[in-house]
Amino acid sequence: MDVKRFIGGRAALVLAVLALGVLAGCARTSVSHLDSRPVVAAAPASLPMQFFRFDFTGKPVANGYVVRGRAVPVPDALPPWVDRLEELTLAAYLRDPAGTVLSTSEKSYKGMPLNDGAAVPFEFVLSPAGDAAGNYAISFGYKAVFGSQKARSAVSASGPPPAGTVFFASEGALVRQ
């Protein structure tokens, strides 16, 4: 083995790792592409998205904000065979006016049937870094796997949904350089 080539290869690897570290330090999480509402409002607020509507209230607490509400599926936006929510992760993003995420919180939920009036209750506590008061808003995100109870009944209830009977929907934050 050529020692010069071995050392040169390691140096290139070290430089590549350092460059990735510097670039990662410049990344920021953004929700500027998502709609938002003020985190604190005089009345309950609603924020419609493509496959869910978020009805919520927000209030200040000692070190941030608490946001409570419910996520309501939008049945007219879903394929007609969907009657079940297999998996769901909801996210709340405290953001500045430019859409930069200052705090985030996620919660995962188990599957449930999508009957009339189906809704998923949530509560998020969001704390911006530092003590500065700001013109904060809230955006929401979700990762949802929808399915069919009829298709699920044809296989084991504890296993994964059958192939071809799953609809995945997601809206959320982006990482930008």
Image (cartoon, grey):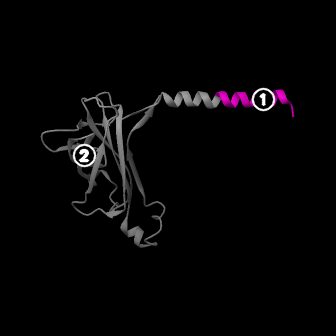
> Mark 2 packing: few (<14 Cα in 10 Å), some, or many (20+)?
many
Q: Report how far apart the C-alphas of labels 1 and 2 lie in the structure.
A: 54 Å
**Of all residues shown, which one is farthest toward the left?**
42
- In-front residue for pair 121/11: 11
According to the picture, the residue beneath numbered tag 2 turns out to be: 67
Q: Residue furthest right?
A: 1
Q: Is residue 10 magenta?
A: yes
With respect to residue 177, does 148 lie above or below? below
The reply, left or right, for residue 157 in relation to residue 125 is right
Total number of numbered discs in the rendering: 2
Residue occupying the point 30% across, 37% down: 94
In percent of width and height, residue 49 lies at 29, 44
**100 left or right of 160 in image:** left
Question: Foreground residue, 129 or 72?
Answer: 129
Q: Mark 2 or mark 1, which is nearer the start of the sequence?
A: 1
Q: What residue range appears in magenta?
A: 1-15
Residue 7 occupies which quadrant of the picture? Answer: top right
**Residue 174 lies in quadrant:** top left
Question: In terms of secondary structure, where does tag 2 sit?
Answer: strand
Amino acid identity at mark 2: Val
Residue lying at 30% horizontally and 42% vertically, measured from the top left: 126
* Residue 82 percent location from the top left of the image: 34, 60
Identify the residue at image location x=31%, y=34%. Answer: 95
Dot 1 alpha-carbon crowd within 10 angstroms: few under 14, some 14 to 19, many 20 or more: few
Classify mark 1: helix, strand or loop: helix
x, y (%) of residue 166? 42, 58
Is residue 73 something that shows in the picture?
Answer: no
Q: Quadrant of the N terminus?
A: top right
Which secondary structure is most common in the magenta stretch? helix
| Disc 1 target residue | 7
Which residue type carries mark 1? Answer: Ile
